[in-house]
Amino acid sequence: MPTRSVSGTAAVIAAPIVAAAAVGLVLLALSWPTLVAKPRGVPVAITGQPQLVQQATAAVSARSADAIDLIPVTDRAAAVADIRQRDVVGAIVLDPARPEVLTASAAGSAGQQVMSQLTTALQQFMAQGQQPPGGQTPALTVTDVVPLSSDDPSGARFAIAGLPLALGGVLGGVLLSVALTGVRRRLIGLLGYGVAAGLGLAAILGPWYGALPGAYLASAAGIGAIVTSVAIVVVGLRHLIGPAGFGVGALLFILGATPISGATVPRELLPSVWSDLGQWFPQGAGNTLLRNLNYFPDAPTLAGWLVAAAWSAIGVLLILLPTRRRHAAPAVETRPVAERQVGDRPVIRC
């Protein structure tokens, strides 16, 4: 009796501590990117007169250290092409008669922040330079080459698109694992879930919220592929290691991959090792894929599809792996029970 009392007291003390530690772990996992977020080598194109390009590059390098990487291009058209292909987040055109800053608000808040700082620096650089013959410094023009949708001018609605990619995948995997049994049924259910989730989420984020202005079916296909790739891995983990697979899937995709996916903190503000790693997970690849499908049709999308296919293949492999089945308890032999009367009371004899 004393042993049980001590054990119960220890559990009462330990359980709240473990629960609080788990909440703290979640907070740290989701918030640490904001502590290390800062521009790191953000690519920006620059073109114009060689002397002006050299002077501006030196001035920007001295001002921003390693935050901005200025990349020389031949002319304005080349700069616009690089922006549309997402090779750079913006560009500086140093034309003495018409200086211009090219931005792409659809590329995300990090690019806008960097280009805003560059615009201020360029204005100061022009003010300190040699005055033209007319005595007036030409006005600096800012052109948004790839603007956000008019229904989502701040990009806030698009930012939430990354959340259902992870949560929807994990939740779908849990529900399908519980509701369906057998490899065939689960695989068919996963395919159906991918189609339904893709069409449904794309309808909400696209026509309803206005966050996805591109082709509806393309967005639905991208969302469906990413959500399915997460769900199928969760189902595979559940098949392989039991209910603990749900926890492993949540840790992997929600606490592990979401902070480095670029959905909560722009990938340009993360250390390169984490930024690159995040693109190997479904959320990171999916966030980039959706942005390219809806705003940057000239940018490559193959990587996003390949990441979804790779994680789906991993999930199928986990589902097909043999597992050690629990042996059924041996059957207990039963014999008929007979009664006989002894005095006033019946006696049961086996």
Image (cartoon, grey):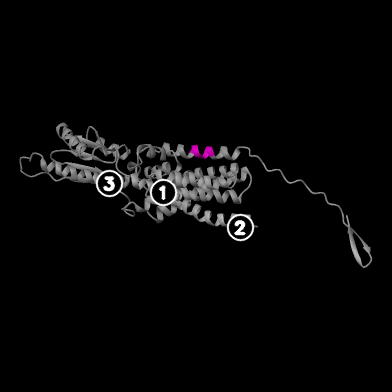
Q: CA distance from mark 1 to mark 3?
A: 27 Å
* Quadrant (top left/top right/bottom left/bottom right) for the N terminus: bottom right
In the rendered structure, the answer to whether residue 257 lies left or right of residue 38 reads right
Q: Residue furthest front?
A: 2
Q: Amino acid at mark 1?
A: Leu
Using a 10 Å C-alpha cutoff, classify the residue at mark 3 as few (fewer than 14 neighbours), some (14 to 19) or many (20 or more). some
Q: Amino acid at mark 3?
A: Gln
Q: Could you tell me what secondary structure mostly forms the magenta stretch?
A: helix
Q: Mark 1 sits on what residue?
A: 28
Using a 10 Å C-alpha cutoff, classify the residue at mark 2 as few (fewer than 14 neighbours), some (14 to 19) or many (20 or more). few
Q: Quadrant of residue 2?
A: bottom right
Labelled disc at residue 279: none
In the rendered structure, the answer to whether residue 289 lies left or right of residue 233 reads left
Position in image of residue 309 (x %, y %): 49, 38
N-term-proximal mark, 2 vs 1: 2
Residue at 53 percent of width and 38 percent of height: 314
Labelled disc at residue 5: 2
